[in-house]
Image (cartoon, grey):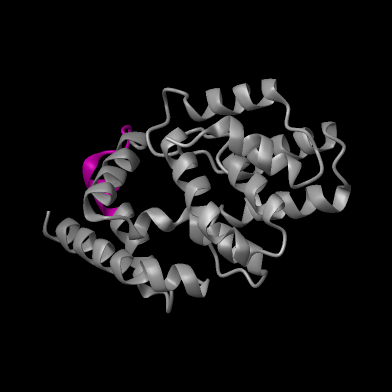
């Protein structure tokens, strides 16, 4: 697991602001809530770790990093407004830290871009989405764990309905011309992501 405190301090410093230690504690506690199985500290750590490797590709790395910190800050299973509430929390934190309104608006937009993982034209949004979706291109064992974690977050959904809806979602990713829109992450993850998704969709269709 990464050093969250070190990353927190560095990412706020890159915005010319100071990250509040109590806010970090609340944010980490939120990611550790018991209803979470996928949107967890593990996912946050993986996102921040990967972002460190590709931050040089962003126009505003500090803003992209803060967006990743907050992109799943609020998570209620099956709720439609998780990203919007996460963006609001981020805006409140940034405003309290004295960030400019244009910075706040851009970070909110980056968080909202993760809601549907659509093909954004803004380059930093594309990178944030790709980092959030990097799990699809994980090694097979980690991807299998991820699929189990997603299922756990939808434990209330009957098996047959879940298999149908999950299969449809993964198939939509496969129908895209490219899952990853940034050249570096496309080169690193696209092939394995398609292998993982194809295997999962095929298995679900045979269940």
Coordinates of residue 57 in the picture (x, y in percent): 61, 66
Residue in view at x 62 percent, y 40 percent: 70
Please indicate, yes or no, whether residue 180 appears anywhere in the rendered image.
Answer: no
| Front-most of residues 157 and 108 | 108
Q: Residue at x 46, y 67 (%)?
A: 185
x and y percentages locating residue 143 in the rendered image: 28, 51
Q: For residue 120, say whether it is visible.
A: yes
Magenta region's main secondary structure? helix
How many marks can you see?
0
The answer to whether 75 appears left or right of 61 in the picture is left
Q: Nearer the viewer, residue 176 or 59?
A: 59
Q: Is residue 4 above or below residue 137?
A: above
Residue in the picture at 11% in, 59% down? 206
Q: Nearer the viewer, residue 143 or 165?
A: 143
- The reply to whether the magenta stretch includes residue 193 is no
From the viewer's side, name the closer residue of 196 and 79: 196
In this rendering, position of residue 156 left or right of residue 134 = left
Q: Residue furthest toward the bottom? A: 177
- x, y percentage for residue 16? 82, 43
Question: In which quadrant of the rendered view does residue 151 lie?
Answer: top left
Residue at (59% x, 30% y) in the render: 5
- Image quadrant holding the N terminus, namely top left
- Looking at the rendering, the stretch of residues picked out in magenta corresponds to 155-164
The quarter of the picture where residue 134 lies is bottom left
> Where is residue 111 drawn, in percent x and y?
64, 50
Relative to 153, 80 lies left or right: right
Q: Work out which residue is located at the far left of the displayed protein and give it.
A: 206
């Amino acid at each position: 697991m990464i050093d969250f405190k070190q990353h927190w301090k560095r990412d706020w410093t890159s915005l010319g602001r100071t990250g509040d230690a109590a806010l970090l504690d609340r944010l980490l506690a939120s990611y550790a809530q018991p209803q979470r199985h996928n949107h967890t500290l593990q996912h946050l750590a993986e996102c921040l770790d990967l972002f460190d490797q590709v931050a040089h590709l962003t126009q505003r790395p500090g803003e992209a990093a803060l967006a990743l910190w907050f992109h799943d800050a609020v998570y209620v299973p099956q709720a439609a407004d998780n990203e919007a509430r996460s963006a609001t929390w981020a805006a409140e934190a940034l405003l309290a830290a004295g960030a400019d309104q244009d910075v706040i608006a851009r970070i909110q937009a980056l968080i909202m871009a993760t809601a549907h993982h659509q093909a954004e034209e803004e380059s930093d949004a594309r990178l944030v989405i790709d980092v959030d979706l990097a799990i699809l291109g994980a090694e097979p064992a980690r991807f299998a764990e991820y699929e189990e974690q997603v299922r756990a977050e939808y434990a209330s959904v009957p098996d047959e309905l879940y298999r149908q809806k999950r299969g449809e979602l993964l198939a939509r990713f496969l129908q895209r011309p490219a899952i990853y829109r940034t050249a570096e992450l496309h080169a690193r993850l696209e092939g394995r992501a398609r292998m993982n998704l194809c295997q999962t969709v095929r298995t679900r269709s045979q269940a």
